[in-house]
Image (cartoon, grey):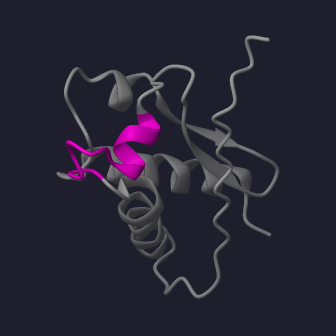
Amino acid sequence: MIKRSAIYVAMNNALRDVKSDLTFPFRTGNLKFNATYGVVNDNSFSIVFDGTIAPYIPFLEYGTIKSQKHVGFISVRARNQVIMSLSKTFNRKVVRYKVENKIDWSNNND
């Protein structure tokens, strides 16, 4: 089992790498500095792209008629950054990982 402190290190390294990638969407900084953060669970961590803080995330991730510039910035580029970061942090090849695309775009204001 991996120590909790190692999970924090891995999460912080992965989060740093995701946010510092040159293809990370950046206009006002809200997505980068407020809506993207890490959460540590028992034996894992999650990088959260919070749609309640940045409700335009789906438009960036899936694109619009006017712009396809950031399509896949979470599902492809951020995921690959996390995998590479884990490989560097633990100095080994990542052979098994779990990606959960928990996306809820429902309106909870009912």
Q: Position of residue 102 (x, y in %)?
A: 68, 49
Question: Residue drawn 68% across and 60% down?
Answer: 100
Q: Is residue 45 above or below residue 95?
A: above
Question: Residue drawn 40% across and 49% down?
Answer: 61
Q: Position of residue 21 (x, y in %)?
A: 24, 53
Q: Which residues are magenta?
A: 57-70
Q: Position of residue 47 (x, y in %)?
A: 56, 46
Taking the magenta stretch, the answer to whether it contains residue 64 is yes
Image quarter of the N terminus: bottom right
Which residue of the protein is positioned furthest toward the top in this rendering?
109
Q: Is residue 16 above or below residue 71?
A: above
Question: Residue drawn 22% across and 20% down?
Answer: 28
Compared across the picture, whether 94 is left or right of 32 comes to right
Compared across the picture, whether 29 is left or right of 75 comes to left
Q: Nearer the viewer, residue 68 or 87?
A: 68
Compared across the picture, whether 56 is left or right of 70 comes to right
Taking the magenta stretch, the answer to whether it contains residue 40 is no
